[in-house]
Amino acid sequence: PHAYGAVELIGRGSGCGARPVIDRMIRNACTQLWKMGIVFYDKAKETLSPTEMGRISSQYYLSPETVNLFVEELTAGVVDGRGIDPTEPVVTYAQILKLVCSSTEFQQLNARKDELFELECMMIGKQLAHANRQVDMIDSVSIAKGSGNVSQNKKLQSDIKKLSKRGGIQGVFRKGKDSKQASVIEISPVYGGSESTHGKVNILLQNYIARKSCRKSSLITDSNYIAQNAPRILRALLEICLANHWPNISIMCHSLCVSVECQRWWFDTPLWPLLKHCGLKAESLINISKKTFSFPSYGDIEEIEHESIGDIAILFSISRDQASAVKKVCKRVPRVDINTHVHPITDTVLNMSVLVRFRDVFECVKDLHGRSMGFWVLVESPEANLILFSRRIDLKTSGKLRRDGTMLSIPICTRSLSARLSGRNPSIFFVHVLSDDWPGSVGCVAEVDLSHCLPQDATREIPTLTRFLTLHPLSVRATNNARIEKYFPFRFFNPIQTHYFHRVFYSDENTIIGAPTGSGKTTAAELAIFRTHTDPNLFRAGVVEGVKIWMEEQAVGKMIDKKLIKSEKKKEEGEKDSLDLTQLSSSVLPIFCSDSGVVVYV
């Protein structure tokens, strides 16, 4: 106990009990977790229950301090007095990287003095000469004299110039066209610079995504540690953003997740994984990446497929052979189609069906794409700036399951959206499908128009549901028929049956009854049948229900003529024979069975 802070036990002897001290330590720990939002702690009952942030922390093995840091930084300044997030925090990619690199999982990666020069070279785009001693002289001598920041330390800059003049420019940097390469820093600015811990982690993380190597062994070790933990932390940050229903930050975090896991920036061309396929060379992909032509979008890829080989060669300044290879590998970039259908259930509840499947032009290579590929499906309300639904799905790359795709049925309540939109219903939704396994902008967005599903004025009530009345149970004698009274095994109808009795039994209006299982909905069909049986002007009624349920649970099953059911089952599907009512006695209802269920004719 002494190692865990129980200092009051020191000097009290071995007979002093440690239970009160341990209990107090546990309560303090629970209180701290409760303040961080990891658990909900009931002090009176001394019970713990998890929260959404606690689930994310446990699933991704993040410390509570890291999760608390993410939530505080993202929600700073956007929470009003009621505790509701009215707007999404506006952040950039640089701020997201700073947030990830500031997590407690990286706090031990302090910047060493002998690493500062190489870190600064990564930022300014210089490639070091690995086999030159004068670089070590700069690391050990010049950095020790100043603050260590190349861009700010004038003494360090002058020493670099002197050493460069004495041994030539090749004494410090590589000679030739490689002496000035593109900087590994694509997301700038790097907050804190190379001297801070989170700045160092930021530089090494971007260096890892750019697939560049480090010279010093300490940086190599730290880079490997960052590469192992950064994807996990970014995934946790993505879950936090999805839990808060932030659309823009969620998409940005997802882009960074795929970039780190695939070691390709999301804004690069999606053809990089297809290197060496169909003879495609790296030089051609570099030329494609340098073009201002926004190649990663779906429409651009389709345009490339329809362009001639000569036009592709001219557009990207590549040979005709490479242009032919580019046109072939475009078909191997995974692309999906989104089919949506929306229909209203009530005036405030919608049901959206989303079908996601690969396009027919997509050519699958099992060694490259695998048996399935992951995608995130997000439903966004751009007017309310909210994510209404999010789920990760796997699409099969071959076989019948690829043709069928994945169908999602999404219920959406628009009442909370109307409150955000000042009493106006939303008019449009966006459905995003983001690739989780392929680098580059491999995604698709579908626009869903809601103008035909919802009224524009959300304050106007539409009577879509019947108000349930408090009525006394109605007796079965209300049918005024002794034979019908004997048919029912009960004396009184239940409240739901009482509510719809007169509309079903004494009117000819169409009725839709929606009620829980076992509430007496089948009785409504039986009452409608009895109405047609007692009214000479009505000659036919039809009910479709499962044979087994009708036979076992309903009393009408006892009145079915078994011989008639057996003969009707033997008939061929294409045969159209009329039902002979003379085969049934006058004491039973003329009922026959079909393959799809029981159909009752009167």
Image (cartoon, helix red, strand yellow):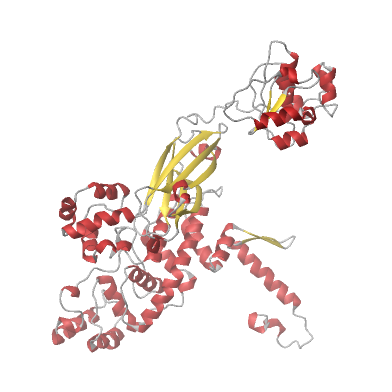
**Residue 517 versus residue 12: which sits nearer the camera?**
517
The C terminus - image quarter = top right
Give the residue drawn at x 24%, y 66%: 282
Q: Residue at x 31, y 68 (%)?
A: 210
Residue 407 percent across, percent down from the top left: 50, 45
Which residue of the protein is positioned furthest toward the top in this rendering? 537
Q: In the image shown, does 508 or 449 lie closer to the viewer?
A: 508
Where 80 sits versus 44, above or below?
Answer: above
Observer-nearest residue: 570 or 474? 570
Residue placed most toward the observer, 73 or 230 = 230
Q: Quadrant of the N terminus?
A: bottom right
Residue 184 image offset from top left, x and y in percent: 29, 69
Q: Residue 126: image x %, image y %?
A: 23, 74
Residue 112 against residue 337 in the figure, above or below:
below
Figure quadrant of residue 276:
bottom left
Q: Is residue 160 left or right of residue 429?
A: left
Residue depicted at x 66% and y 69%: 28
Drawn side of residue 139 relative to residue 417, left or right:
left
